Amino acid sequence: MTNRISWTNRRGVFALAAAAAMVAASRGATARPLDQVLSTKTLRAGINPTLPPFGTFNEKNEIDGFDVDIAREIARIMQVNLEVVRVGSPDRIPFLQADRIDIVLGSITRLPARALVIDFTMPLHTQTMGVLSVEGKGIEKLADLDRDSVNLVQVRGTIGIPWIERNAPKAKVTLLDNYPDAIRTIAQGRADAMVDVVESVVIPIRQFRNVRWKILDEAIDSTWVPIGVQKGNYSLRDALNVILFELHKNGFVNRTWQKWFDAPMKTPIPFNPMF
């Protein structure tokens, strides 16, 4: 279904955060603090397998990727087993709020709206927000998106939606549930572009070899991406901060990024002991 979105008639990230909070409140879900994670010897990590190479299915049909390698190393350091739980972009915060997972990965950008309902660790990686399109659509700069003739496709619950609401209100927008469907929509000519994290699309677009893809040189923003935990779960968050600091310090995060992206992180996380 295609609709024009606006601050008044389309729920974006703020509405999603509020909905997640209501879900958690209605269920009375309480997060498992660090001592429970350790006593049960299980860390439940929410990972989106439709977001390669952050999360993807391997040849054994198991969820794999950058996020899994990071979560697996965290579990190893904590001396617990890792339980990977499949989540999508729209339900990752509700899963965390409902205590179906202990941590959530999957490009969950640190945003003020999300910080109202979940807590974040120090940054795990950075990501660049930009525009994916194809040649011949007449989209050469960000301002070209704000036209009645432009059809955008977006994944529900992602950071591109509020940006479009503010900066391209004239565009028509189709909201879908996952990245493969969104990218396929552009490849098939049913949409002109999408606004999202560049790192989230560079791998999936390779399967459409005959499409003349274009990522605008004009970037929108560079953001920090942490790990999410349930609001108030300070014991788990604080332990994760120490672990992540060490993983940055010993180079594990950067090596894992290079393994999955075949390139260094565009904007490295600054080494700062005060994180």
Image (cartoon, grey):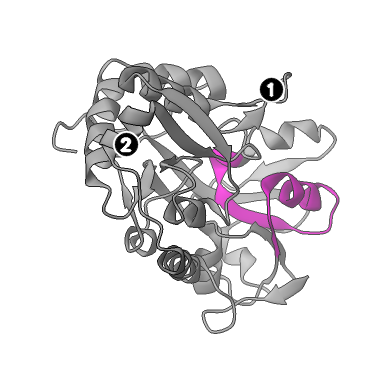
Residue at x 57%, y 26% (from the top left corner): 65
Residue at x 86%, y 50% (from the top left corner): 188
Say whether residue 86 is magenta: no
Q: Amino acid at mark 2?
A: Gln
**Image quadrant containing the N terminus:** bottom right
Residue count near mark 2 (Cα–Cα under 10 Å), binned few <14, some 14–19, many ≥20:
few
Q: From the viewer's perspective, tell me whether residue 21 is left or right of residue 121.
A: right
Question: Which type of secondary structure does the marked residue at label 2 adopt?
Answer: helix
Question: Which type of secondary structure does the marked residue at label 1 adopt?
Answer: loop
Say whether residue 182 is magenta: yes
Is 272 or 30 nearer to us in this picture?
30
Location of residue 252 (image quadrant):
top left
Q: Is residue 140 visible?
A: no
Q: Which residue is mark 1?
A: 58
- Above or below, comparing residue 68 to residue 30 in the picture: above
Q: Which residue is mark 2?
A: 36
Q: Is residue 250 visible?
A: yes
Q: Position of residue 152 (x, y in %)?
A: 69, 62
Total tally of numbered discs in the picture: 2
Magenta stretch bounds: 175-200
- Above or below, comparing residue 145 to residue 206 in the picture: below
Residue occupying the far bottom of the picture: 8
Q: Position of residue 8 (x, y in %)?
A: 53, 84
Residue at x 32%, y 39% (from the top left corner): 123
Is 162 or 113 nearer to us in this picture?
113
Kindly identify which numbered label has been placed on residue 211: none
Q: Position of residue 220 (x, y in %)?
A: 47, 54
Residue at x 59%, y 82% (from the top left corner): 9
Q: CA distance from mark 1 to mark 2?
A: 31 Å
Q: Amino acid at mark 1?
A: Asn
Is 179 or 129 nearer to us in this picture?
179
Residue occupying the far left of the picture: 274
